[in-house]
Image: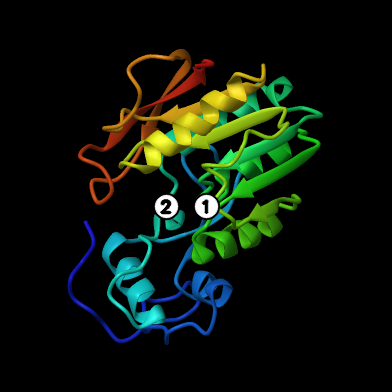
Amino acid sequence: MRPSSRITGGRPGPELGGWTEPATGPADFVRRNTAIKRPPLVPEIALYLATEVTPIWQATEESLSRGSVPPPFWAFAWAGGQALARYVLDNPDTVGGREVLDIGSGSGIVAIAAAMAGAKRVVAAEIDPFAAAAIGLNAALNGVAITVETRDLLDRAAAGWGVALAGDICYEEPMASRAMNLLRRIAGRGRTVLLGDPGRAYLPRSGIEELARYEVPTSRELEDREAREGVVWRVLPE
């Protein structure tokens, strides 16, 4: 899906009629190349999101002046993340009063839902600097406190988290395998571990049990259909 062409600047910003200039930093880039929107399944949460796919990809590459950069997954509210955020908001006892780790946080939608649902502390793990900036901005936008962890935690020992959450992490290897290994290690400590996924290619076929299913409106720019079923799974110990 990544475009091969390049442009000077980004797409029109929410307050501007023309193309934005390349941003001076990740947070500035996020503000100037997105608009504040509310995901259809989770309208309680406001996020800085892209309105189109191609311009945000091109603007990301232009900002870093090179052609190989992390895809801007943070700029979209993916179906798996929306489903998991919806589940957490509807079932606040899942995270209430507990320390929560959101793995591969992206826009931070799941972490924000956990904070809104009464989690004692929320850490959003995200190594992409643009995503980390987006999480900070989105947390402030929704009036919640979230700690952003930019170190790669996937191969580290499972810490004492009360709950681990992950939305849409099964779209490619080896990310899916590494993330699932960590989630299973945390589940093996007797912790609650939830995964939101709309049927990605690398979703495990065993070791998970379905908790809820939601119809999530989406876009043909992002998906191969206008709606996907976002499923919330409980991850079982190894």
| Residue 166 percent location from the top left of the image | 52, 35
SS of the residue under disc 1: loop
SS of the residue under disc 2: loop
Q: Which mark is residue 208?
A: none
Q: Give the mark, 1 or 2, whose residue is nearer the N terminus.
A: 2
Whether residue 168 is visible to the viewer of this picture, yes or no, is no
What's the residue type where badge 1 is placed? Ser
- Colour logic: rainbow
Identified at 38% across, 72% down, the residue is: 60
Mark 1 crowd level (few <14, some 14–19, many ≥20, 10 Å Cα): many
Identified at 56% across, 77% down, the residue is: 28
Q: Are marks 1 and 2 in contact (CB under 8 Å)?
A: yes
On the rendered image, what quadrant is the N terminus found in?
Answer: bottom left
Kindly report the distance in space between the C-alpha atoms of the residues bearing marks 1 and 2: 7 Å
Mark 2 crowd level (few <14, some 14–19, many ≥20, 10 Å Cα): many
Q: Nearer the viewer, residue 104 or 43?
A: 104
What's the residue type where badge 2 is placed? Phe
| Residue 197 percent location from the top left of the image | 40, 30
46 over 233 or under it: above or below: below
Res 80 quadrant in image: top left
Q: Which mark is residue 107?
A: 1
| Residue 217 percent location from the top left of the image | 36, 36
Name the residue that disc number 2 marks. 76
Res 89 quadrant in image: top right
| Residue 45 percent location from the top left of the image | 60, 45
Identified at 57% across, 49% down, the residue is: 108
Question: In the image, 84: left or right of 149?
Answer: left
Q: How many marks?
A: 2
Identified at 26% across, 38% down, the residue is: 226
For this orientation, the residue located farthest to the left is 4
